[in-house]
Image (cartoon, rainbow, N blue to C red):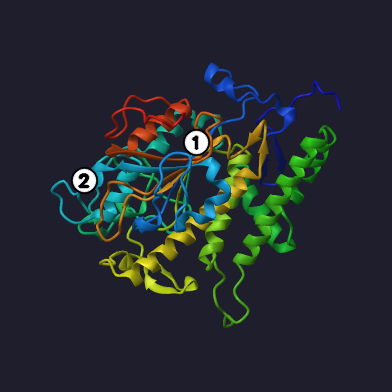
Amino acid sequence: MSRNIRISRRTVLRGLGTALALPWLEIMGPSRPWAMAEGDTQGVVPRRMAFLYVPNGVHMEAWTPSEDGAQFRLPSTLQSLAPFQRELLVLSGLTQENANAKGDGGGDHARALSAFLTGAHPRKTDGANIQVGISVDQVAAKGIGQSTRYPSLELGCDPSAQAGNCDSGYSCAYSSNIAWSSESTPLAKEVNPRSLFDRLFGNGDSAGMTQSSARRSRYRQSILDFVNEDANRLRDRLGRTDARKLEEYLTSVREIERRLTLASQPAPDVPPGTERPSGVPSDYKEHIRLMYDLMALAFQADLTRVITFVLANEGSGRSYGFLGVPEGHHDLSHHGNDKDKQAKIAKINTFHVEQFAYLLEKLRGIREGDGTVLDHSMILYGSGIGDGDRHNHDDLPILLAGGGSGTIRTGRHLKYASGTPLNNLFLSMLDRMESHVDRLGDSQGALPQLSG
C-alpha cells in the first residue's frame, strides 16, 4: 500500500439501509490534536464531551476523599475507579444555586435535573409554559455539531416525559430531561439500545433501514454482512495497524448486535403468547452497559462528539433487589441519618460508579492517534443533589474523567470554595471544545486549576 494514500474521515461502509462509520485510522491523516486550537481540523483527533447523571444524590461520606491534590485516596464508593485514578478529577464544592427553591417551595428533584446542565432556575409549572435554559451540551452541539452526523445524542434508561405533574407542581419535563436546546425545548432521551443501534448505523433511508432490519432478523444476519464488500475493499488499502483497528471495531459492532438479540428475547419460562420486548433489556445492568457500549462506538466512529446520559430520572424509585436493596431508591435517599439506609444508598452509588468504570475502560481501550478515546474526551459524572436527605444543591458529587487532549491535568481531588458555580466548569469544558461563550446560566468565569 502506498503510504501517500489517504481516505476521508467521513468515509463509511455502505450496504442496504446501512452506513457504517469508521473509527479513526492512520490512513485518514496525521494525528495532530493541537491543530484544533490553530483552526485546522484536517487529520485531527476530535475532542468529545459526555455528561452522565445519577438521581437522588449520594452518600457523601463514602464519596468525598479526605485528602486534596494528587495524593488523595479513593473512598469506598469510588474504589472501582482505582484503575483510572490518574485519569480522573474529583471535584468538591461545586454548586447549582438555581436548583434551590428561591421561594418556589418543594420540587428539588425537578429543579436538580433541569438546572444541572443549564444553571438556570426552572419556572414552576406543570403546564405547557415550561422554561429553564439552554444546556451546556446543546451549546457545544450548536458550536461543533455540524462536524458529525449527529450534533448530539440524548440517551438514558428511563423515558422522557413532556407533560404532567411529577414533583410538587413541576412538570415531568423537568425531572426527566437533562438536555434543553432552548429555554422551553427539552430533548427527549433514546432509551432503547436496539433503536439507537439502528439510528447510529442506518443510512437515513427509512425504507432501506426497515428492509435491512427485517432481513437481519429473518436470516439472523449481522449488519456487517451488508457492508462486507465495502469492508473488503478497504482492507486491501490498510496497513497492519489500521487493519487491526478496523477488525477490533467490527468485532465490537458484532458483539453488541449479539447482546441486543439476547436482550430482546423472552426468558425461557415466559408463558406462551407473551409479547416480545421492544429491545429494552429487563436487566438494568445490561441496559446501562449496552448504552455505554453504543456511546463508545459513537465516539469511536465520530458519529457525535456530545452525549448526555441519564441513568434514571430524578426522584427515581427504582428498586435494586439484585444488590440486596429491595427498597425504592428515592425512599431510601430520605434516610434520616439511619445507618442501614445510608449503607444501602452507598450500595446503589457503588453500583452506578462501577458502570461508570466500565465505560471508562471501554474508552481507554480504543486506541486513537497518539492516545485513546478517553485521552481525547471529557466525561462528567454527577448528580444535581448532594445528600438525598438534605436535598442540597451545593457541594455536589462531581467527577471528570479524561484529559481533553492534554488540556486537563487529571489524577487530583480539587476542592473549590463553597458556592462555586458548577457552570464555571462547563465554561471551561466549552472552551476546550472550541465552543466559547462568555456566560452560561449563573457562571462567573472559567473554573481555575483544571490544567495544573
Q: Give the residue pinned by disc 1.
A: 151
Q: Earlier in the sequence, mark 1 or mark 2?
A: 2
Amino acid type at circle 1 is Pro
Q: Give the residue pinned by disc 2.
A: 123
Rendering coords of residue 40 (x, y %):
58, 18
Q: Residue at x 36, y 57 (%)?
A: 61
Q: Residue at x 48, y 61 (%)?
A: 351
Q: Residue at x 41, y 63 (%)?
A: 346
Q: Vertically, is 178 above or below 218?
A: above
Within-10-Å neighbours for mark 1: few <14, some 14–19, many 20+:
many
Q: Quick one: quadrant of the N terminus?
A: top right
Q: Vertically, is 210 above or below 119?
A: below
Circle 2 — which element?
loop
- Left or right of residue 250: residue 322: left
Q: What whole-number distance in Å separates the C-alpha atoms at marks 1 and 2?
A: 27 Å
Q: Is residue 280 visible?
A: no
Q: Residue at x 28, y 29 (%)?
A: 444
Amino acid type at circle 2 is Arg
Q: Nearer the viewer, residue 193 or 112?
A: 112
Rendering coords of residue 271 (x, y %):
57, 83
Residue 63 occupies quadrant: bottom left
Count of all numbered marks drawn on residues in the image: 2
